[in-house]
Image (cartoon, helix red, strand yellow):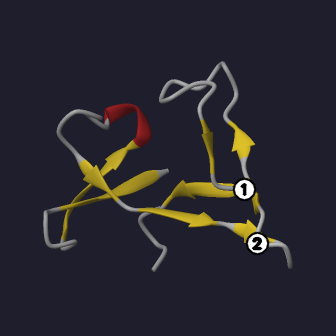
């Protein structure tokens, strides 16, 4: 699976395998779904402790990197 690498203006400049991403330098697209209820409460989930990036942190109910063929 290749990930879209973009510049500061969100223009695609290349594609990289997930294992090839430099998290300190590369900019890549992600999408997220925030779930709220009628009380205005937000559902957050905790990332698995086994994740390479930000293990155990809290965030959107669903999120992921945008792959090469996705818009």
- Report the Cα–Cα distance between label 1 and label 2: 15 Å
Q: Residue furthest right?
A: 38
| Residue at numbered disc 1 | 61
59 to the left or right of 27 = right
In the image, 7: left or right of 54?
left
Mark carried by residue 5 = none
Q: Nearer the viewer, residue 17 or 64?
A: 64
Rendered view: 16 above or below 4: above
CB-based contact (under 8 Å), mark 1 and mark 2: no
User: Residue 64 vs residue 13: left or right?
Assistant: right
User: Which one is nearer the viewer's eye here, 1 or 44?
Assistant: 44
Residue found 63% across the figure and 25% down from its top: 56
What residue is disc 2 on?
40
Which residue is found at the position 47% from the left and 29% from the top?
Answer: 53
Please identify the quadrant where the C terminus is shown: bottom left
Residue 64 at x, y percent in the picture: 56, 55
Residue 20 at x, y = what percent?
32, 34
From the top left corner, tell me how far across and down residue 60 is, in percent: 64, 55
Q: Earlier in the sequence, mark 1 or mark 2?
A: 2
């Amino acid at each position: 699976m290749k990930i879209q690498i973009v510049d500061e203006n969100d223009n695609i400049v290349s594609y990289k395998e997930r294992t090839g991403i430099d998290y300190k330098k590369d900019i890549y697209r992600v999408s997220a779904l925030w779930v709220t209820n009628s009380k205005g409460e937000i559902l957050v989930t905790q990332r698995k402790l086994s994740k390479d990036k930000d293990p155990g942190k809290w965030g959107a109910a669903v999120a992921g990197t945008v792959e090469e063929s996705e818009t």
